[in-house]
C-alpha cells in the first residue's frame, strides 16, 4: 500500500511538472519538452497499472485504461492519473499507446509516444516525440 501511495504521489509530482503553464505564466518550455514529460507521466502510470493488473493491455485499450477499468480487472486500482488531459501532448492530441509495439517488431514491449506537430503517426519517426 505504501509503494502504491508513493507511486501516486510521484505521478502527481510529474504531472505538476508536466504542466508548468498552470503554475506560472512566464515558463518557457518547448512543446517537445512538455510532450516528453507527458509521455513520461503516462509511462509511469502505465507501469503501475501493469503491476496492479498483472499484464500489459493491448493497443485496443489505449491509454483509457489509466482512467477507466475497461476490462473489469479485479486488481485495477485507478484512476491512475487525476486529469484526462495528462495523456495529451502539447499540441492537444492524445498520446499513442501500442502493444505490441508495431513500430519496432523486434521490440516485444509497448510504446507510448506523440504523433507530433504534424498530427501524422509516423511510427516514432519524422516529428513524432518519444522517449526510450
Image (tube, grey):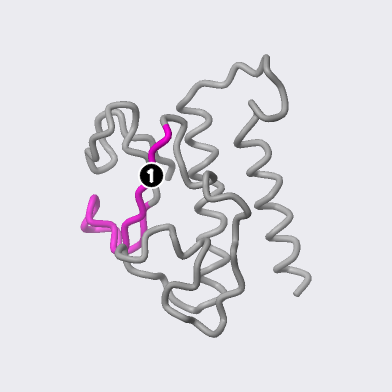
Q: Residue at x 73, y 68 (%)?
A: 3
Residue 98: say if magenta: yes
What is the crowding at mark 1: few (fewer than 14 residues within 10 Å), some, or many (at least 20)? Answer: many
Q: How many marks?
A: 1
Q: Which region of the structure is painted magenta?
A: 92-111
56 is higher (above) or lower (below) than 121 = below
**In-image side of 109 versus 12 (left or right):** left
Q: Which quarter of the rendered picture does the C terminus lie within?
A: top left
Residue at the outermost right position:
2
- Residue at disc 1, secondary structure: strand
| Residue placed under numbered mark 1 in the picture | 113
Please tell me which residue lies in front, 103 or 19.
19
Q: Residue at x 24, y 40 (%)?
A: 121
Please tell me which residue lies in front, 17 or 132.
17
| Position of residue 125 measured from the top left corner of the image (x, y, whole percent) | 26, 35
**In-image side of 62 versus 79 (left or right):** left
76 is higher (above) or lower (below) than 7 = below
Q: Residue at x 37, y 39 (%)?
A: 114
123 is higher (above) or lower (below) than 127 = below
Residue 112: say if magenta: no
Q: Which quarter of the rendered picture does the N terminus lie within?
A: bottom right
| Position of residue 12 measured from the top left corner of the image (x, y, whole percent) | 69, 49
| Position of residue 57 measured from the top left corner of the image (x, y, whole percent) | 39, 70
Predominant SS along the magenta part? loop
Q: Residue at x 24, y 58 (%)?
A: 106
Residue at the outermost bottom position:
74
Amino acid at each position: 500500500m505504501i509503494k502504491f501511495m508513493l507511486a501516486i504521489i510521484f505521478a502527481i509530482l510529474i504531472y505538476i511538472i508536466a504542466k508548468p503553464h498552470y503554475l506560472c505564466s512566464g515558463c518557457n518550455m518547448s512543446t517537445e519538452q512538455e510532450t516528453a514529460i507527458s509521455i513520461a507521466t503516462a509511462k509511469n502510470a502505465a507501469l503501475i497499472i501493469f503491476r496492479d493488473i498483472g499484464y500489459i493491455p493491448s493497443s485496443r485499450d489505449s491509454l483509457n485504461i489509466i482512467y477507466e477499468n475497461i476490462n473489469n480487472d479485479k486488481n485495477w486500482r485507478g484512476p491512475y492519473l487525476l486529469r484526462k488531459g495528462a495523456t495529451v501532448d502539447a499540441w492537444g492530441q492524445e498520446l499513442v499507446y501500442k502493444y505490441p509495439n508495431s513500430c519496432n517488431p523486434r521490440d516485444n514491449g509497448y510504446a507510448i509516444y506523440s504523433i507530433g506537430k504534424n498530427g501524422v503517426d509516423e511510427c516514432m519517426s519524422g516529428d513524432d516525440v518519444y522517449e526510450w
